[in-house]
Image: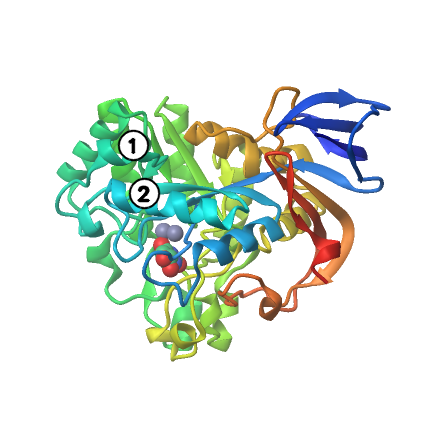
């Protein structure tokens, strides 16, 4: 069967142009003007066709925390957000630190049959930071990276061994950078607003120390490393300098770090609580600069769905994390492209092409011979974000009421329509 996407504005790596896209057997077989001869035609006139988003940092919570999210609900949230591929973090229960859990996740994702789900294996057993997990067996089972996300591996010798071992299997360590000995109960950024609210703060150094350590290890060992969810101006400076010195470092940030500042914590809304915390305007500006100059390679969500029970408690006790899959494109398009900071091709490099390159995944680009993972979006359609309408079980967004541009109309995975907005209403 051949599927034709007609008359859309297609986002290529370095330009946007009107093109038809012909798909067969899950692959793009032709691009050009006035293509015809298909069994199924999708009219994309007036719409924009983007490469499917690859979100390399999400929490799907299954196994163990299905009350917050499961692989099926998270996959539906993904395709509703134009995301065709997610990499899921291992802080589940049991922790994904062995091949059995990797296989379980892969099988559950096949049953859901929506987006592609790529498991990330834990660096250490139980994410306890003490001994290495079954890295080789997980790699063989299909883990695409390693991380103890949620916390840092505090023992530098274990981190050294993990990085060396990981590189033997062509896997990268994705580093959640947080010096646990310096957190000291901090729940927000340490500064004016934490003082104003009487909430305990975390210094930027909590993050920067571990960014520096992991970069030092990568440099000494000549192996690559990837820094998760950068939030500090100083972190951006450290990564920029390391890249300049030839260290094989890549890095990601999230919409909340380039849109929000800690001004939002002053209403004590626990949906604003996230690790690392949202910082100050100086940091937000530096994150934007880092995205512009290539210091920050990828935009991810750190989709961290939580139940109401875990969020509707006092600020100090609430769980860290924001539900992000369904808002990442619209927020990024509105705040980076509509505002003139990035072009649409540059944005899609951060959301698709670069994540594919960093992890060696398929997709990330619209090209003949490439996999047909795509989304069709209406960048002129605006709407107000309402977390209660999310398909994700996690309704915890700090962006309720934000007016954004960019509606996802269709999401196509391996040439098959997995999300059709017109059929959801
Ligand atoms: O805010 C966060 N939530 N940061 C993390 O690193 C972990 C995540 C979670 O699992 O909820
Ligand atoms: Zn993290
Ligand atoms: Zn995370």
Q: Is residue 160 left or right of residue 341?
A: left
Q: Is residue 113 left or right of residue 9?
A: left
What residue appears at the point 55 percent right and 47 percent down from the top-left corner?
Answer: 114
Q: Is 100 rendered above or below residue 297?
A: below
User: Few, some or many C-alpha atoms within 10 Å of disc 2 (few <14, some 14-19, many ≥20)?
Assistant: many
Q: Is residue 232 left or right of residue 401?
A: left
Q: Which mark is residue 139?
A: 1
Marks 2 and 1: in contact by CB < 8 Å?
no
x and y percent of residue 306 in the render?
42, 66
Q: Which image quadrant shows ligand 1?
A: bottom left
x and y percent of residue 132 in the render?
16, 40
Q: Which residue is mark 2?
A: 102
Q: Nearer the viewer, residue 214 or 121?
A: 121
What is the secondary structure assignment of the residue under circle 1? Answer: helix
Q: Nearer the viewer, residue 86 or 386?
A: 86
Distance, label 1 to label 2, CA atoms, is 9 Å
What residue appears at the point 22 percent right and 46 percent down from the top-left corner?
Answer: 153
User: Few, some or many C-alpha atoms within 10 Å of disc 1 (few <14, some 14-19, many ≥20)?
Assistant: many
Q: Is 303 rendered above or below residue 144?
A: below
The answer to whether residue 16 is seen in the rendering is no
x and y percent of residue 324 in the render?
52, 56
In the rendered image, which quarter contains the N terminus? top right
x and y percent of residue 142 in the render?
35, 34
What is the secondary structure assignment of the residue under circle 2? Answer: helix
Q: Is residue 99 left or right of residue 282?
A: left
């Amino acid at each position: 069967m051949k599927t034709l996407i007609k008359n859309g504005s297609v986002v290529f790596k370095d330009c946007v142009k009107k093109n038809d896209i012909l798909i067969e057997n899950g692959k793009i077989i032709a691009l050009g003007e006035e293509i015809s001869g298909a069994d199924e035609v999708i009219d994309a006139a007036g719409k924009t066709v983007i490469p499917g988003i690859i979100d390399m940092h999400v929490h799907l919570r299954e196994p163990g925390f299905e009350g917050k999210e499961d692989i099926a609900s998270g996959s539906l949230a993904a395709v509703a957000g134009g995301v065709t591929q997610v990499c899921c973090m291992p802080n589940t229960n049991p922790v994904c630190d062995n091949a059995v859990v990797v296989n379980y996740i892969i099988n559950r994702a096949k049953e859901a049959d929506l987006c592609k789900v790529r498991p990330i294996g834990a660096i250490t057993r139980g994410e306890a930071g003490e001994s290495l997990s079954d890295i080789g067996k997980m790699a063989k089972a299909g883990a695409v990276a390693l991380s103890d996300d949620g916390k840092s591996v505090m023992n530098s010798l274990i981190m050294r061994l993990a990085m060396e071992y990981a590189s033997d299997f062509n896997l990268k360590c994705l580093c959640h950078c947080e010096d646990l000995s310096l957190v000291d109960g901090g729940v927000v950024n340490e500064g004016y607003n934490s003082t104003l609210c009487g909430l305990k703060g975390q210094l930027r150094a909590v993050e920067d120390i571990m960014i520096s350590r992991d970069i030092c290890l990568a440099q000494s060992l000549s192996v690559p490393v990837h820094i998760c969810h950068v939030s500090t101006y100083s972190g951006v400076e450290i990564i920029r300098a390391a890249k300049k010195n030839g260290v094989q470092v890549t890095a990601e940030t999230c919409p909340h770090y380039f849109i929000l500042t800690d001004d939002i914590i002053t209403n004590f809304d626990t949906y604003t609580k996230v690790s690392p915390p949202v910082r100050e305007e100086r940091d937000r500006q530096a994150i934007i600069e880092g995205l512009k100059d290539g210091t920050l390679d990828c935009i991810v969500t750190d989709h961290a769905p939580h139940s109401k029970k875990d969020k509707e408690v006092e600020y100090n006790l609430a769980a860290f994390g924001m539900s992000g899959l369904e808002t990442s494109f619209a927020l990024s398009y509105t705040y980076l492209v509509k505002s003139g900071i990035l072009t649409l091709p540059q944005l899609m490099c951060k959301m698709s092409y670069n994540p594919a390159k960093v992890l060696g995944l398929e997709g990330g680009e619209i090209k003949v011979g490439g996999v047909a993972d795509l989304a069709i979006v209406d960048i002129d359609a605006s709407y107000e974000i309402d977390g209660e309408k999310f398909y994700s079980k996690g309704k915890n967004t700090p962006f309720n009421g934000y007016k954004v541009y960019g509606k996802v109309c269709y999401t196509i995975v391996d040439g098959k329509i997995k999300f059709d907005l017109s059929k959801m209403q």
